[in-house]
Image (spheres, grey):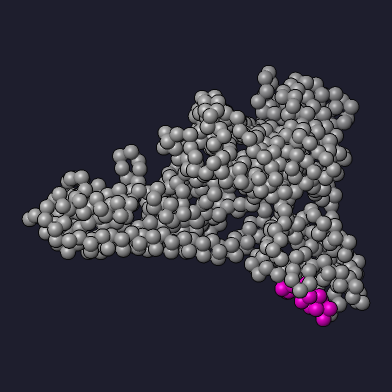
Amino acid sequence: MKTEYLDKNNKGGIIKATVIGGILIALILIAGTVWMGNSAGHDAQKAVRNVSLLYLDELAGRREQVVASTLDDYINDMDVAIGLIEKNDLSSQENLQTYQARMKQLYGLEKFAFVNESGLIYTSRGTRNDIDTYGFDYNSINSPVISVKTENNGEKKIIVAMPVDRLNLAGQTLVAAFMEISMDRFLDAVSLDKYDNSTTFCNICKSDGVSFTGLVLGGLSADDNLITALGKAEYEDGYDYDSVKSHFNNMQEGVVSFTYDGIKETLSYVPIHGTDWMLTYLIRESVISEQIDTMVMSQCNEKGLKYECKLIGGVADYYIGDDMKLKQVLINILSNAIKFTDAPGDVNLTIERTNCYEDRSTLKFTIKDTGIGMDESFIPKIFDSFTQENNNSNNKYGSTGLGMAITKNIVELMSGSITVRSKKGEGTEFTIIVTLKNSENTGIDSDYLILKDLRVLVVDDEEVAAEHARLVLDEIAIKSDIALSGQEALNMLEVAHTKQEHYNLVLLDWKMPGMDGLEVSKEIRKRYDNETTVIILTSFNWDEIVDEALHIGVDSFLAKPLFASNVIDEFERIARKNNTSLFKKKQRADLKEKKILLAEDIEINAEIMKEILAVKDTVTEYAANGRIALDMFASSEEFYYDAILMDIRMPEMDGLEAASSIRALDRKDASSIPIIAMTANAFDEDVQRSLQVGMNAHLSKPVEPDRLYQTLEELIWEYEDQAGKI
């Protein structure tokens, strides 16, 4: 399942809206997270990744410079501090301590200490004998050394040590000095946050893999060691665990692509100059359509919390609004709900369409937890900047007091409202209300299934969930019935079988009283073999039943809440795999050596498209705007090009005008050559206008390689058939 995006490039100073792909599909929770979902073409993904890695490496390189510069500043500060020491400061230990206290205050240090030639540490509070716990050799140090010290309580400190010129302190010779900086202060200086697992995937690790932030793989892994976590990953062709481990051990930069816990990721890493640290930058294959559900479910499972999402009132798959802002709000509040709720506890998200008027819908998002709650007297202050109820919560949970102020501002930017109810010791409930424009897109675009011929049986003991499933299927003209128990479902299947009106698909809740989903699945296979497709629905992690379910004959899994587009995508995948005859087949041309005219004004987008097309050995010719594309087509021989990929928003001449001008040319191929619109405005007025000027199809950005190939293959075959080339 995909999220469709409207163009957010700042062209002409206008920032346009974004189509929210099901608010819960890409945005909220289920963005088609299907256990056995469709796989994109590996070669195409690799081609896109090759281009993306150029920029990923650049990001990592720039951040490494920031970290190295910050460390250099620490070294310079220490050099200056040592240079400020005067003869009187060395006349006694008391005077040295006074000097050290001044330097600590001046530079905000936790510790500023000297070491004598016997290893005794002189601090502003006295002496210490634990030099062995620090990561430098005071006897042989001849240049600055940076290391990390882990305290007994697990807290990490940055240690910057350097030699001193054998200073005499009342008969003792000082040979080294070091400063101690809290990890929080250091991470803040380099724009990293040890508590933030939702907004950044940049991290710093030691060469042995220990994470400075305590987070690994953007919070996806429960490990605090990157090397340990990567040992559990599945690697793409050309990458392997041993190489990554060797790169870290030998402080070599590199990149690796892998799948961790079902999510594809690419990690770039570079050594930080002057240290044994590695800076890592993580990017996910589908960052835009990241499944918040995966993150929330994983975090709740780790804490022993129960998580559930419900839809009420006919929530559609797609709306038009600003998905990034809404995603920020939901992630922030859900993350806080998890953070401030201890096991055993609940975190629930409910989405309700409360009103629908003309072309707009009002949606209410309710996030409720059974966490620590707040005093009612504090609630009016919760949206104030840098405000926390008490310092104890801050110390335990890592809150900064800024997140809710930002959240409120974002909601108000969307012309929405946010309210909160809470009771100390019982939990908190946030309610966000926003109004979004309805989308004509249903999310259903199957070239294979004949939807009106499908019959679906929904089995769920929770009547609200069952009725919701029937509602979303009915809205796309799929005939569906519901059963509220496993036994009722078997009875209905028996009647349908007798009347030869078989159900094509059974959507079956896993956890039900009496017969659960697995027991019903087993009985279905026993009675009717493979007559129907069975998909298990669940709000829970299904890892524990995967093997048993596959053995019984379950075809796949889908996460709740249910969306029609998810059902169709997965059922189509299963139908194709099983050779089910509910297809609408189209002929396809071979793209090898086909000549494609690509009109795209953003160079990086053009490079990505050329890489994707190169996978199919096409010949791609590039035009930087619509006017150039028009001139290239007009000056070419008839039937030279096999198709045109046309961006809509371009300078000089936009894609609509260019397509209209091409169609108006007096040449045999002008009226029939496939022209495919490429736009992030997949469902606004641009799409309608693109069809009006004679374009054949549109693809939404970011373009899915498989959809691109399919569209080109089918349209080029029809074009060649009409032209008598086949």
Residue 560 covered by magenta stretch: no
Question: Residue 549, percent across and down?
Answer: 64, 32
Residue for point 52% across, 26% down: 424
**Residue range of the region highlighted in magenta in the rendering:** 620-635
Quarter of the image with the C terminus is bottom right
**Image quadrant where residue 404 sits:** top right
Depth check: give the residue in front, 330 or 41: 330
Secondary structure predominantly adopted by residues drawn in magenta: helix
The answer to whether residue 372 is visible is yes
**Image quadrant where residue 614 sits:** bottom right
Depth check: give the residue in front, 45 or 502: 45
Q: Say whether residue 575 is left or right of residue 134.
A: right
Depth check: give the residue in front, 716 or 606: 606
Question: Residue 145, percent across and down?
Answer: 28, 59
Depth check: give the residue in front, 493 or 649: 649
Q: Say whether residue 114 is left or right of residue 480.
A: left
Residue for point 53% across, 59% down: 238
